Image (cartoon, grey):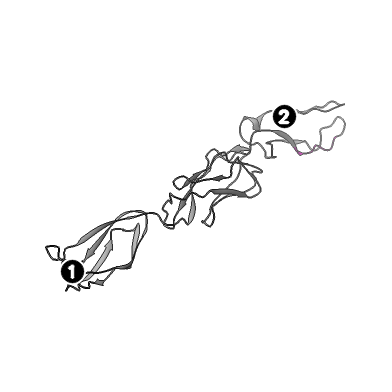
Amino acid sequence: TVQDVSGNTVTNSSAAITVESSSGSNSTLSGNSTPTSATNGVATFSGLTQTGTKGTYVLTFRSGSLAIDYQDIVVSYGAATKLVLTTSPLGFVNRTNFDVQPAVTVQDAYDNTVTNYATAISVAMTGGSTLTGSSTSATPSSGVATFSGLGAYGLVANTNVLTFSSGALGTATQSFNLTHGPAYQLAIATQASGATNGSVFTVQPVVEIQDRDGNRVTTGTQSTQDVVVSASATTLAGT
C-alpha cells in the first residue's frame, strides 16, 4: 500500500512497486515481482515463490523515492523428492557388521531435510554378495533414517551396490567390495604332481588360507601362520 507520512492510503497513486529478496545464491524469488502498479494506492502481487535453502529471507518493496518497506518471510522445506546417503557405511569385512552403519536423509528438491517424513526406508544389495542384518529397513526420525546391524558376505571380487529406497523418492546408492574375513579353512590352489619314489615332486603343492567363503586371507597374523602337510602310509620329506 502507498501511504502518506501519517499512514493514510494514497488512493490516487499508481506508482510502480517492485519487490526483491535477500536470498542471494541460496534461494530465488520468482513470479510477478516487478513492476506492479498500484491501483487506488494498493499494489497486489501474484505468483511470488521463494525457492531454495530453507531459512529467513527479507522481502524489500521499492517505488522510486518513496520510503522502502520490508517483510521477513520464513521458507520451510518442500515436498520430499529424494534420498541422500549422509553417512556412508565403512568397514566391509566379510561376515562382519559394517564398522560404520549408513544413515539416509530425506530431502526436497532443494536439498532441505524433510523432517516430517516418516515412511520406512529400505535397503537392498546387488552384485553377487548377500546382505545380512536383522532389519533391512529403518524409519526416519526428523528426516534421517539410521540403519544398524547391516553386514554382508560373499567374494571379495564382487562389486556390490547398496540401494536405499522409499516409495517414489529418488534412490541413494553406494558401491563397495568386501575384504576377507578371519581364517576358516585351507584349500589346495595347486595340486602336487610328478610323484616319483625318492624324488622331489615335479609340481609342488600350493595351499591357500581362506575365510569361510573362499576368499584368500592376505593380511594379519592368520595370513602367515604355518601350514602342516602330512602323508599316510609313506614318508614325506621336504619343507
Assign the N terminus to one quadrant of the image: bottom left
The kind of residue on which mark 1 rests is Gly
Q: Residue 85, how many percent across, how many down?
A: 49, 49
Considering depth in this image, is 133 or 216 the residue closer to the camera?
A: 133
Helix, strand or loop for the magenta stretch, by majority: loop
Q: How many labels does the image show?
A: 2
Which-is-in-front pick, marks 2 and 1?
1
Residue lying at 81% horizontally and 35% vertically, measured from the top left: 201
Query: Residue, x 54% and y 55% (percent of image)?
Result: 167
* Magenta segment includes 156: no
Horizontal and vertical percent position of residue 205: 77, 36
Judged left or right of residue 111, residue 29 is left
Quadrant in which the C terminus is drawn: top right
Q: Which of marks 2 and 1 is nearer the N terminus?
A: 1
Query: Does residue 65 appear left or right of residue 101 in this picture?
Result: left
Q: Can residue 160 be seen in this view?
A: no
The one nearer the camera, 79 or 54, is 79
Mark 1 = which residue? 64
Residue 180 quadrant: top right
Q: Is mark 1 on a helix, strand or loop?
A: loop
Region of the chain picked out in magenta, as a range:
188-195
Which residue carries the number 2 mark? 227
Give amino acid for label 2.
Val
Q: Which residue is drawn at 14% across and 63% down?
A: 7
Question: Tag 2's secondary structure?
Answer: loop
Q: How packed is label 2: few (under 14 Cα within 10 Å), some, or many (20 or more)?
A: few
Q: How far apart are marks 2 and 1 (CA)?
A: 91 Å
Task: Answer with the quarter of the image where residue 237 lies.
Answer: top right
